[in-house]
Each structure stands twice: as C-alpha cells, then as structure tokens.
Amino acid sequence: MVTIAEALKIADSLDLDLVEISPKADPPVCRAVDYQKFLYQQKKKQKEMKAKTTKIVVKEIRFGPNTDEHDYDFKLKHARKFLEEGAKLKSFVFFKGRSILYKEKGEILLLRLAQDLEDVGKVEQLPKLEGKRMTMFIAAKVKKK
C-alpha cells in the first residue's frame, strides 16, 4: 500500500498522470497513465464503434387504392431492389376523398405486396389504417454468409 504523496511522486518521476480507477474501493485504486493518450484511445474506440453500427434506411412506396397491374409491377420491382440493398420498406396506400370506401382494396394490395416480397423481406408491421393512409412496414431478410 502506497500513500497518495508517494504515488504522486512515482507518477511525476515517470512523467505520467495519477488517475483514480476505483474510488469506492478500500483503499482507493489509482494508476499512473498518460492521460492525454488515454483520452485519445477512448475517442478512437468510440469512433470505431460508431463506424461499425449500421444505418437503417427507410424507403417509401406509395400506392393508390385502384393501382393498375403495370404500376404495381413497376413498384414491386423497386421495392425488391430496396430490400435487396438492405433498406426497410414503408409501403402505404393513400386514400383521397371518397376512395376511403375502398379500405379492403388497399389492404388486399398491401398484403399482396408482402406475399410477393416474401423471399427478400419479412413483414414488420401488418397494414394499419392511420387517417387517410394504410401503412405497412417490411424489413429486409438478413443474408447468411
């Protein structure tokens, strides 16, 4: 066991800083380190951790309740591309004016989309009506390496 004065003297002779590691321990634990280097390494670790996190991109595809077959196929192709890139897909049917009467058509359209994209994505949230929009989320399936 070394006193604080002796510890400071040792750290000073080595041109290092005395850093308290565990203040609640009995006796408190200290370490002689280069504090600037320590801070630099901490910052570097945080930067690496941030770089490793994946950024989730959400792409949107909008349908009308009376979307034609060709338009549906065109949007399906784009949706497939988005999911293959690893993005999440937010597909929604927007009801204008009196078209809200065709809620079932919108739900059928979204469920059909989910079924067609079953091989590249999985449904995260089933179709849900929020005001004039019926929304559904599809997440990309994780690729096995």
Image: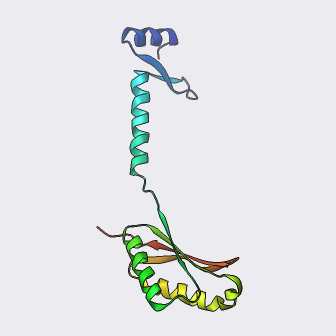
Q: Left or right? Give the position of 93 relative to 145.
A: right
- Estimate the x, y position of residue 1 in percent, counting from the top left: 47, 17
Tell me the quarter of the picture where residue 144 sits. Answer: bottom left
Query: Which of the image's four quarters has the C terminus?
Result: bottom left
Count of residue discs? 0
- Estimate the x, y position of residue 101 in percent, counting from the top left: 69, 90
Quick one: 108 or 2, which is closer to the camera? 108
* Above or below, 16 relative to 62: above
Colour convention of the picture: rainbow
- Estimate the x, y position of residue 35 in percent, counting from the top left: 43, 22
- Estimate the x, y position of residue 77 in percent, counting from the top left: 39, 80
* Above or below, 52 relative to 1: below
* Above or below, 25 relative to 81: above
Q: Left or right? Give the position of 144 relative to 91.
A: left
Taking the spot 58% from the left edge, 29% from the top edge, the residue there is 24
Quick one: 10 or 139, which is closer to the camera? 139
Q: Left or right? Give the position of 69 relative to 13.
A: right
Taking the spot 41% from the left edge, 27% from the top edge, the residue there is 38
Tell me the quarter of the picture where residue 105 sits. Answer: bottom right
Quick one: 74 or 134, which is closer to the camera? 74
